């Protein structure tokens, strides 16, 4: 409701300024009339809002207080994940959401969780940067009686230290990438360079493990090098630039997220190296965000393995079960698929179309 009022007010302001600048009388009169209408609507809306605000105040004690300790803002995937939590855990939906962007600093993220414990939130959502280092603070949350729901990435702490986890299967994502490559190359040799994600993150560890599981079955594949690009575009570009200096003979680049792929493509463009379905280098990416899928549709990224960032609804389902005093599963799997450029058909992936891209909101 507050949002509706703000939109209407903004609309009125635009119309009011149009009145000010109106150069023709007719236009001015029409605009003035619609401004009046809009003003009435605003009044009505304001009345409703006041009533609702009163209800809100009465009910504000009923808002469920949640804390979201986020990784940072390293990628488009992360931005979509953060936005999704803000949309689902809104005041209108009955939540009071505290948010901390940990800027990819594990120690800061541990402190963020500690802060939520001090604020006595009802639930903590944690997208852990690294898998390691969580035992102490998870124990503190448990001692304080605050359920912790791990989201997206995983922790290596004992299961008993957190309530439940929601996320994708990162090992499977890596295996899907490997299986697709094997199908595509069909026995041809591969000299592979890997731009990994953040060191110690389960997304990095899982995708690496999954891809390596498939690579181990292919003696015709050589992984020339594997360096971390921190899941950022700048990181992807920097690693690719150094790979280009060190290796002259490669035909596959695996980027563990879309933003790294954008950086790697920039580095290859600058070096005059061609890639994609019509180029010399096969690019594999992960995430399948809107822009990543645009590059896939354009044939620049050959295969893009999805990782769904919209995990807040799953997290809310779990929270509701806990609120109802129900038993929850220890892990809720968010499923993914993979996409390939037009002209490629695969048993592991869907061939990209404009319709698929149009349906991708993030
Ligand atoms: O792939 C990357 C983000 O943990 C699955 O983190 C997530 C990864 C995602 O920065 O873009």
Image (cartoon, rainbow, N blue to C red):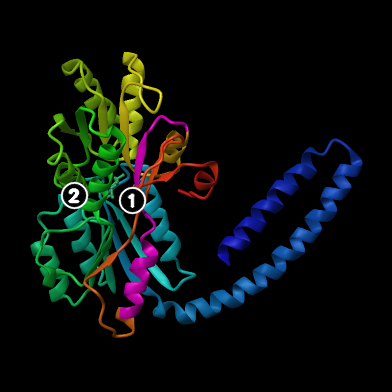
Determine crowd level at label 2: few under 14, some 14-19, many 20+ residues with C-alpha closer than 10 A.
many
Q: Residue at x 15, y 58 (%)?
A: 155
Q: Residue 233, can we see it?
A: no
SS category of the residue bearing label 2 = helix
Could you say where residue 150 lies in the image, as x and y percent from the top left?
Answer: 23, 63
Q: Marks 2 and 1, Cα distance to the nearest angstrom?
A: 12 Å
Badge 1 residue CB within 8 Å of ligand 1: yes
Is-magenta flag for residue 299?
A: yes
Above/below status of 23 relative to 108? above
Could you say where residue 226 lies in the image, as x and y percent from the top left?
Answer: 15, 32
Residue where numbered disc 1 is placed: 307
The first of marks 2 and 1 along the sequence is: 2
Q: Residue 114, can we see it?
A: yes
Q: Quadrant of the N terminus?
A: bottom right
Closer-to-camera residue (125/344)? 344
SS category of the residue bearing label 1 = loop
Determine crowd level at label 1: few under 14, some 14-19, many 20+ residues with C-alpha closer than 10 A.
many
Residue where numbered disc 2 is placed: 206
- Residue 276 in which image quadrant: top left
Could you say where residue 254 lies in the image, as x and y percent from the top left?
Answer: 26, 34
Q: Residue at x 90, y 41 (%)?
A: 25
């Amino acid at each position: 409701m507050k949002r509706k009022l703000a939109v209407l007010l903004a609309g009125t302001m635009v119309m009011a300024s149009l009145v000010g600048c109106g150069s023709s009388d007719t236009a001015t009169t029409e605009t003035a009339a619609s401004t009046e209408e809009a003003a009435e609507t605003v009044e009505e809306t304001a009345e409703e809002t006041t009533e609702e605000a009163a209800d809100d105040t009465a009910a504000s004690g009923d808002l469920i207080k949640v804390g979201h300790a986020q990784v940072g803002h390293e990628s488009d995937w992360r931005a979509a994940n953060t936005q999704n939590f803000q949309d689902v855990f809104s005041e209108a939906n009955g939540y009071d959401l505290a948010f901390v962007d940990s800027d990819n600093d594990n120690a800061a993220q541990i402190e963020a969780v500690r802060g939520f414990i001090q604020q006595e939130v009802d639930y903590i959502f944690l997208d852990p940067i690294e898998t390691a280092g969580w035992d102490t603070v998870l124990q503190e949350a448990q001692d304080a009686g605050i359920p912790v729901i791990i989201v997206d990435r995983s922790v290596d702490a004992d299961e008993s230290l957190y309530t439940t986890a929601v996320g994708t299967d990162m090992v499977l994502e890596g295996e899907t990438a490997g299986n697709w490559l094997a199908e595509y190359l069909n026995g041809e040799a591969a000299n592979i360079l890997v731009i990994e994600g953040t060191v110690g993150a389960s997304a990095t560890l899982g995708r690496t493990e999954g891809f390596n599981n498939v690579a181990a079955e292919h003696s015709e594949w050589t992984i020339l090098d594997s360096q971390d690009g921190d899941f950022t575009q700048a990181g992807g570009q920097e690693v690719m630039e150094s790979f280009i200096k060190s290796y002259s003979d490669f035909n596959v680049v695996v980027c563990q997220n879309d933003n790294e792929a954008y950086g790697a493509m920039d580095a290859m463009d600058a070096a005059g190296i061609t890639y994609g379905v019509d180029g010399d280098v096969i690019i594999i990416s992960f995430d399948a965000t809107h822009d990543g899928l645009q590059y896939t549709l354009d044939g620049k990224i050959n295969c893009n393995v999805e990782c769904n960032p919209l995990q807040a609804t799953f997290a809310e389902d779990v929270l509701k079960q806990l609120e109802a005093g129900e038993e929850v599963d220890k892990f809720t799997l968010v499923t993914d698929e993979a996409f390939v450029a037009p002209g490629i058909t695969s048993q592991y992936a869907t061939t990209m179309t404009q319709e698929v891209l149009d349906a991708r909101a993030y």
